Image (tube, rainbow, N blue to C red):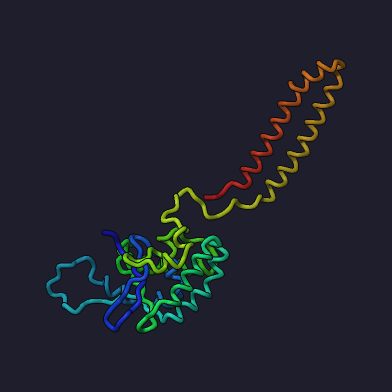
Amino acid sequence: MGNRTYLTIRTAPDQQEVLFEGNNSLAYFWLLLLKRKDIEQVQPAFQTLYAGGDDEEDDNAPEDSYVDTDIRIPLDEALHNAAAHRSYVERVYPALLPLYDDWRAYLATVPSHDNMLYIDLEEFSGFYVNVNQFIGELLDFYTHVSGNKAYFRPAIPDTTGWEAIGRKQFYDYSGHYRNTPEIVDYQQKSRPDRPLPLGYKLLIGCWVVFSLLLLGGGFYSLGFFHSVWLQALMALVILLPILLIIIGGLVWLINKGTQKTK
């Protein structure tokens, strides 16, 4: 059994229905339904929940000590926040934008008894040393969003989460959801090669000038040989290595200059 996260609605006063869930993962699209204040408001509930430490055998603990850590947000407000965060997805994860738009449109069609969305992250918080570290990481996500910086992988666990067991509404609704990978290999990068730095552009320019001089010197040396056959032979001996050096050096400089940073 994994540590589950849930995005739910109420279909009746005392009945909840899970729309999407995560297993040992956090769907960051869910956080795009919120703002920093929504995380800050739930922090006291999490601190109360974990105030007693790990002692689960305290016989003196009151039976009604249940702490509700669900993040609640009106559906209309959540959709407004999601629309405001669309530019972040468009700029940082453009390939995910069709999935994000499908997901927002789908949530707008879900019938809710109280017009609220509920996000349950309680079990996932158990992966952290303490609750403050957990809340801090959630808040750090919004720092990355405001700076248009990548934060998660373009896979189902990190985007919408999996549609809940027994449901296929969103699966049928969105072809982009069906085509989103469940995992992304750790070596796969979502960012393109970095632009060629100015320093490498100057080096490449110098290398081109040097290459032209070297190539010109090679052709000039062929003039010392009067036999056509001898010139052809010396072209292989002199010009071919020069060309290999020129091309090899140019490729190395370009690859080095555009190499992805870790």
Q: Nearer the viewer, residue 14 or 245?
A: 14
Say whether residue 249 is visible.
yes
State the residue at coordinates (66%, 50%). 197
Q: Residue furthest front?
A: 172
State the residue at coordinates (44%, 63%). 159
* Quadrant assignment, res 134: bottom left
Where residue 224 appears, as percent x and y from the top left, is 86, 19
State the residue at coordinates (33%, 75%). 70
Tell me: residue 226, above or below residue 7: above
Where residue 172 appears, as percent x and y from the top left, is 43, 66
Say whether residue 43 is visible.
no
The answer to whether residue 240 is left or right of residue 33 is right
Tell me: residue 11, above or below residue 242: below
* Quadrant assignment, res 207: top right
Where residue 146 appears, as percent x and y from the top left, is 53, 69
Where residue 216 appears, as percent x and y from the top left, is 82, 31
* Quadrant assignment, res 215: top right
**Quadrant location of the N terminus?**
bottom left
Tell me: residue 1, above or below residue 81: above
